[in-house]
Amino acid sequence: MFYSDRNLAFMLGMGGCQLLLCLILLIDLCSSVLVEQQPLVLTYHNGPLLTTIPTVDVHLIWYGRFSPAQRSIVGDFVQSLEASKATEPSVYSWWKTTERYSGASNNAAAMANTRLGKQKLDDGYSLGKSLKRSQIAALVERAIASRAVPENSNAVYLVLTSDDVTVEGFCMSCGFHGDLMPRKKVPLPYAWVGNSETQCPGQCAWPFHQPIYGPQTPPLVAPNGDMGIDGMIINIATVLAGAVTNPFNSGYFQGDAAAPLEAVSACPGIYGKGAYPGFPGELLLDKTTRASYNAHGINGREFLLPAMWDPATGSCQASL
C-alpha cells in the first residue's frame, strides 16, 4: 500500500501521541503505587530529660582488661564533650546539638556540658567473661554499693567491656542504655558498650573494619590507632546521646519504645557529607597517620563521630 508523505506524517504524529499518552498513564500509575518517604521526626514523649542542672557526670566502669592507653582514649573523648576551646570541627560542637532537645516539660535545655566522673576498674572479671544483659545493671549497682562511684540521678553510668567478654545480644546491638532503680528509689540512667575487635568488628567497628555485608570497601585507618577502641567511641557517642535525650524511654524517639530510633541511631552509617551505604561520607584525613576523622578533641585527639538528628533542621547532621 502506498502512503503519501502527508499521510505518513499524520500517522506518525498519531503514533507519537499514543506513545506520549501511554507514558503519561505509566508515570501516573507508578506514582500511585510508590510510597512517599516519610520525613525523619523524633517525637518528644513528655518524659524527663537529663538537664544542665547540675552538670551531668559520666562515670566509667571498666570490666575486663583495658590498657592505660585505651582508657586514656575513652577518657579524653568524654572530657572533649565539654571542651569548648577545641579546634573545629569539634566533639564539643557535635554534642551541642543535644541542647536543641529541650522538651516541653523541662525548664532547662537538654544537657550540653558534661564532665568525666569517677572510674572503677574490674579487671578480675568478677562476674565471669560471659554476661547476661541484666548483669550490666548489676555491675553498676555493685559499683555504687562499694562507693567506687556515687549514686546520682543526674549522671550516666557507662559500663565498658573488653574484647574477651561476651555480652548477651552483643553484635545484634553494639551498645544500649537503660535505667535501674537502686536503694534511693530514683531511676539512674546507665549504658553499655563492648569492644568488638575480636567478636564482630564488621558490625560494630565499621568503617574501621570491612562491613559484614554490603560493598566491601577498604577500611579506614582508626584515628587513635586502635580499631576496637575507635569503634567503641562511635558506639559510646551513640548511647550517650540516647541516654541524654531519652533517658527513661519517654523522651525523644521514633517508633516502638521497645526498639526506638534515637538521636544517633536514627542516622545509621552517616559520618560526613555524601554518605551512602558502604561509604561513610567525606571526612578529614590526618596527613601523618592517614587516619580518617571528623572531630577534634582535647590533647590533640581526633575522633570519628556519627551523625545526630538535629531538631532544628529535622535532618541528620554530621560534624562536617
Image (cartoon, rainbow, N blue to C red):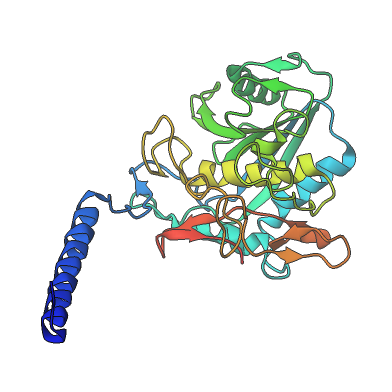
Q: Is residue 189 visible?
A: no
Q: Is residue 197 left or right of residue 28?
A: right
**Which residue is found at the position 61% from the left and 38% from the top?**
213
Q: Quadrant of residue 161?
A: top right
- Quadrant assignment for the C terminus: bottom right
**Which residue is found at the position 67% from the left and 17% from the top?**
131
- Quadrant assignment for the N terminus: bottom left
**Which residue is found at the position 46% from the left and 57% from the top?**
109
Q: Nearer the viewer, residue 45 or 36?
A: 36
Badge count = 0
Q: Is residue 317 visible?
A: yes
Q: Nearer the viewer, residue 148 or 136?
A: 136
Image position of 270 with respect to 149: above or below: below
Residue placed furthest toward the front: 1
| Residue 271 image point, x, y percent | 61, 57
Q: Quadrant of residue 249?
A: top left
| Residue 277 image point, x, y percent | 56, 50
Q: Is residue 64 left or right of residue 56?
A: right
Q: Nearer the viewer, residue 282 or 265?
A: 282
| Residue 94 image point, x, y percent | 60, 60
Q: Nearer the viewer, residue 162 or 293?
A: 293
**Which residue is found at the position 59% from the left and 51% from the top?**
55
| Residue 248 image point, x, y percent | 45, 35
